[in-house]
Amino acid sequence: MKHFTDLKDISSKDLRKILIDAKIRKKKRSKLSILKPDNDAPLKDKLLIQMFEKTSLRTRLSFYLAIKQLGGGTITLRSNELHLGKGSESLEDTAKILSTYGDGFMFRTDSDKKVDSFKKHLSIPIINGLSPSSHPTQVLSDVFTVEEIKKKPISDLNITWIGDSNNVLNSLIAASVKFSFKLNIGCPKKYEPKKFILDWARSKNKKIHIFNNAKKAALNADVIFSDKVISLNDKVNKKIKLKHFKDFKIDKNLISYAKKNCIFLHCLPRGSEVEEKVFKSSNSKVWLQALNRVHVQKSILLYCFGKLR
């Protein structure tokens, strides 16, 4: 049994196998309708249980389609409807029930501790659909999208992140170690990545380049990533935070410092951190980025279920 909770915990070899499988499966689906299972239906009769403690659009839809296209089924739970959410049943007992009824568990949560606790008590695989410190399914899919568009390994490209330091960036830093690509980070001094993720990267002999100047971070970039500066659960003075990021807006001028064929990616939803002209430009590949989550998450499921080629 294999879990998928953090890119740091998965070997580079296995991550690459997931991407190779996703590429093959996406190509084979070119003439299939959206709900028609893959011809081999490798997860026929398997049930994925999804539970959301945080709002979700892309993760919810993409995992629903992923398990359906693999021949299985899914049920979605909301924590506030469970005994666990109301505090009358322990997480350990909840994990036992999930393991009894389902074959896999996808969990989106506001607690890293809960991910670790479920991982300890479940006897089925758990997939982290987002937690405060990690968003591994998003970033692995993003690596797939970059390589699909650029038609070369991401290790040959200059990758830049412009924006706040959050769970997506933590996973991007982990990916930069696993896939050996250069990563520039552009953010205000006060919003640099947390010490734990930088220390982990340094322990792997990886140097992360941090700039408190957006233009320097974007220079010669093949890909520019960003995310919403003000997230839904941000417990900060939003006006002050936006003021700190006023020189980090992704506009046409900033894009001009990158390579001419630079692509822009955003995990969505978006905010004021990106100019409308950039978001809707030919550089922007956000819709393909969102769609590819289905294909990569199918191969993540196969990895967890022990069915990966």
Image (spheres, helix red, strand yellow):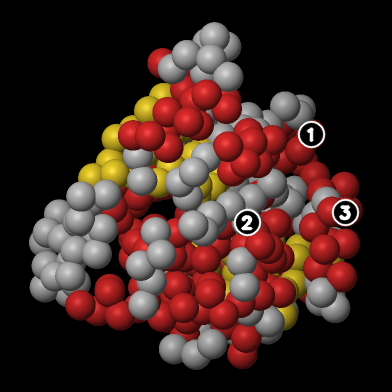
Q: Residue at x 49, y 43 (%)?
A: 123
Neighbour tally class for label 3: few under 14, some 14-19, many 20 plus, Cα within 10 Å: few
State the separation of the CA atoms marked 3 and 2.
17 Å
- Say whether residue 43 is visible: yes
Secondary element under disc 2, as helix, strand or loop, is loop
Please tell me whether residue 21 is drawn above or below residue 102 in the rendered image.
below
Give me the residue at 57% from left, 27% from top: 92
Q: Where is residue 76 shown, x and y percent of the image?
A: 34, 33
Between 12 and 90, the one lying in front of the other is 90
Question: Which of the pair 174/83 is nearer the observer?
Answer: 83
Disc 1: CA contacts within 10 A as few (<14), some (14-19) or many (>=20): few
Q: Look at mark 1 in the image and give the residue it sits on.
A: 240
Image-quadrant location for residue 252: bottom right
Give the side of residue 160 with respect to residue 66, left or right: right
Residue ID for mark 2 = 6
Is residue 234 shown above or below 156?
Answer: above
